[in-house]
Amino acid sequence: MTATTMDSALPARPSPWASRISVAAVHFFVLVLFLQNLHADTWLAILGLVAAHLYSVIVLLYWRNLERSTAGDTVIVALTLEFMLIAIIFWDRFSLWPWSTFFGLFIVQACALLAVRFWKGLRKAPPTAWFGLVVILLYVIIAATAPIIAPFTETEIVGSEYEAWGGKFLLGTDNLGRDWLTRLIYGARNTISIAFITTCLAFFIGALGGFLSAALGGWTDQILGRVVDVLMAIPSLIFALLLLSIFKDYSVFGLTIHPMVLLVVIIAVLDSTRVFRLARAVGMNIVVMDYVEVSRLRGEGMWWVITREILPNAMPPLVAEFGLRFCFVFLFLSALSFLGLGIQPPTADWGSMVRDNATLISFGDITPLLPAMAIALLTIGVNFVVDWFLHQTSGLRDDH
Amino acid sequence: MTTETGNGANGDVLLEMRGLKIEGQADDQWHEIVHGIDLDLRRGEVLGLIGESGAGKSTIGIAAMGFARPGCRIIGGSILFDGIDLRAASEEEKRKLRGARIAYVAQSAAASFNPAHRLIDQYCEMPVQHGIKPRAEAEAEAKDLYRRLQLPEPETIGFRYPHQVSGGQLQRAMTAMAMSCQPDLIIFDEPTTALDVTTQIEVLAAIKKVVRELNTAAIYITHDLAVVSQMADRIMVLRYGHMVEEGSARELIAAPKEEYTRQLLAVRSFRKESQTKIDQDRPLLRIENVSASYGGVVKVLKNVSLDIHKGRTVAVVGESGSGKSTLARAVTGLLPPIEGRVFYGREEMPPALKDRSPEQLRRMQMIYQMPDTALNPRQRIRDIIGRPLEFYLGMRGSDREERVRELLSMIELEPDEFIDRFPDELSGGQKQRVCIARALAAEPELIICDEVTSALDQLVAEEILKLLQRLQDELQVSYMFITHDLATVRAISDEIVVMLRGEIVEQGPRDTVLAPPHHEYTELLLSSVPEMDPDWLDGILAKRAAAS
């Protein structure tokens, strides 16, 4: 009885060999990648090998438990092999940057796995959502494999200042004679990763605080609420500038804080206040539900109540907010960089790239605006995807 | 299936539906939910639509206004209202009809009134909007209608906000609002379902009186056959979007032709053998002089004492606000009592929930009124039932899985089919069964049932009661059964506790409490339960008028 229902629920069970063989191939590939770099930097190469092993185990486990069809397996294997093929063709570039190759491979496999996992939903996705997904995927791949794609290295001065488009430099050079295209690609890596980490941190702090506030109420709620009120009362850009200059030379246990870490933490804390407000409001509505009372009556701890009862039900508004917050953090970061207090030179960053080359705008050259357009495109893409997700989960339907 | 009633030619017909078909959307697909219904309504006639949830009765009722809810669409048949084809009419034409000539009274008046405006402003909005009468005239009429509907202080009640009047008063104010334009047809969609029996009888009497006086035609939608038999001249029984039976109220009640109608009539016939013999010296749960209050000012529970013995059911009865749910909260420790003690066996329970040990919590479980909100929509049935097993009994892996399946079979749900589902994929009755399984998973000795059947259809509710009874016989678990429904009390209780304004007014074995002489309040409760007899409402009103 059990066996028959299982069979009818799932399509023909795909062979486990597909996943095993392809993961073994990947494993071998990464192995070669890091081994041939062993002489250059031994420790880093060993770390790479360990990471590659861990990664293989995780992928294999996830793949094995994934509910999928044979076609799905074929897609995953094909994409993986394709990436490896490209890597072998351009081996001299790829082998120079084993980590980037590894990340690239990771992104391709993760996307393939996720696409197979959510294929049912994806198939019905509207064109806007597809557009958003493609844009995000493009940015992520560029960010992950920046050194491989970029024609030059990040800070290398390769020509004279302000060279025109075309020829050796596809988008010309900047005020110091660095290649624009290279800077733009590296900028994607730096800006997106920092914005992403910051948003995640902001959500962790804000959501945890908000849910605690909603679930415990009373004094906890009052204290957290008032702290957030105070933080929100000060204009965030000015507050961030203030904090950045205060803590710039501050040290903990004799170690100065890395400026990037400082930047991430400060923006995350300031942004978490907005997340807190939302999480608290959403949490309040969930806490009064009977199922939360049931779990309290059962004697469950606060951690269970927050992670198992409240969080899953608060996901849709939080994800919507994540999309928006991510874009705001992006803009905030760029604004700070533009003012000279964000990501520090010579690291490429979209905000400071606009500032450094702003003089070109007065000559009618749109080159300095390219980073701004890159930000705009990503923002639009993220919001399309978030809209689609919200539409899915909230059960909103258009009236036809 | 469909037969001509022969009244089509009659000039008296106000509403005529022929072959009405409506589709609803689920999982991105359209399913037919109303399969060709024929319906005739003459001026001044009251038609009762009855059926369980999902029968399509509300959908048909709303279709009488030429309207389909979002996610629904009318795909076939005709709707003629006083000669106007509502399916062909433009939105503008329909807008003129709605409110002015066809009015709608929703189930929850509290949710249908705009909380930001006074009652009388909302009353006057429609006639003034439609340009039927000026504001002053409408106001004067409102007061007159409020008086006729027996609302207290009819001159001033309209100037209150919706939250300042009680649920029953709000429902009558809603009825008044529907009548503001003297419509030809009013659609009542379960107007008394959310009310207490004692309030329900007042609202029913008021509606009946006004409908009769103004000679308005009405469609009365409900799932309660006893209620509809008081209100309707004719009754139409619906099931799964088909018409089962139609006939005059008296004939249908006296001699139902279809099996399904007979089932509806026979509902509430279930009665357990009451056990009053007490074979233990010590009760399972003893509540001693418990008082409780929200915020410490007004006591909502005053010196309540009661005993619950092993394997027995104690029903706590009262209307809303009587403190019966607060009693449950005080016993479970959600609202620590300010006075009094709760004993479990020989052991005194700590008043607050957080001071109780998991073992103490395990022995006492609770089932809620609304199964929709009592189950986390993001957890599968396996995890919902499995969690107490894991939490209290430390079961994991295949042990847990096996026990979850066992519990599912115990509550008569096929394990293979249901174990992987989410609560959204279950019907109301199935959800309540899962709630019962979750409570049973902890292997409790006492289950507190807070209005567990009031959100369910009658046939489903009866199944749940039978299940609870079977489980009690098998597992010797005790129930504290909180309800406002005396029919349920009659069916399942061994002992009855009647509560009024936080105090116990009468308590004792079932047969003693239900047999005369009653306490005055018990008498009121008992006499307010609608009976199938179409003359019951008039009779009871006459009796009460004579007594006062």
Image (cartoon, rainbow, N blue to C red):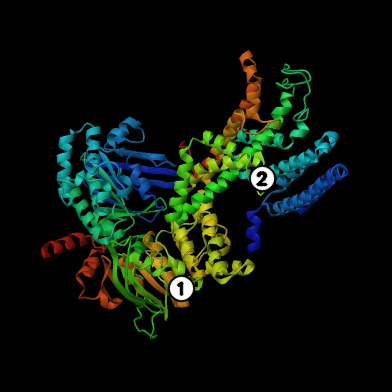
Please indicate whether residue B363 sits to the left or right of residue A21 in the image: left
Q: Answer few, some or many: residues within 10 Å of disc 2's Cα (few below 14, many 20 plus, some between 14 and 19).
A: few
Examine the rendered structure and indicate whether residue B425 appears above or below residue A26.
below
- Asked whether the viewer can see residue B422, the reply is no
Discs 1, 2: same chain: no
Relative depth, front residue between B201 and B238: B201
* Amino acid type indicated by mark 1: Leu
Image coordinates of residue B22 in percent, x first then y, are: 42, 43
Q: Answer few, some or many: residues within 10 Å of disc 1's Cα (few below 14, many 20 plus, some between 14 and 19).
A: some
Subunit that carries the residue with mark 2: A
> In which quadrant will I find the N terminus of chain A?
bottom right
Relative depth, front residue between B541 and B384: B384
Image coordinates of residue A23 in percent, x first then y, are: 78, 49
- Asked whether the viewer can see residue B218, the reply is yes
Please indicate whether residue A241 sits to the left or right of residue A399 in the image: right
The secondary element bearing badge 2 is classed as helix
Image coordinates of residue A96 in percent, x first then y, are: 83, 37
What is the spatial separation of the Cα atoms under label 1 and label 2, in whole angstroms? 45 Å
- The image quarter in which residue A126 lies: top right
Examine the rendered structure and indicate whether residue B340 appears above or below residue B74.
below
Instruction: Check contact, mark 1 vs mark 2: CB within 8 A.
Output: no
Residue drawn 38% across the image and 43% down it: B20
Subunit that carries the residue with mark 1: B
* Amino acid type indicated by mark 2: Leu
Residue drawn 69% across the image and 28% down it: A184
Relative depth, front residue between A39 and B109: A39
The secondary element bearing badge 1 is classed as helix
**Which of pointers 1 and 2 indicates the residue nearer the eye?**
2
Find disc 2 in the rendering and name its residue: A114
Find disc 1 in the rendering and name its residue: B471
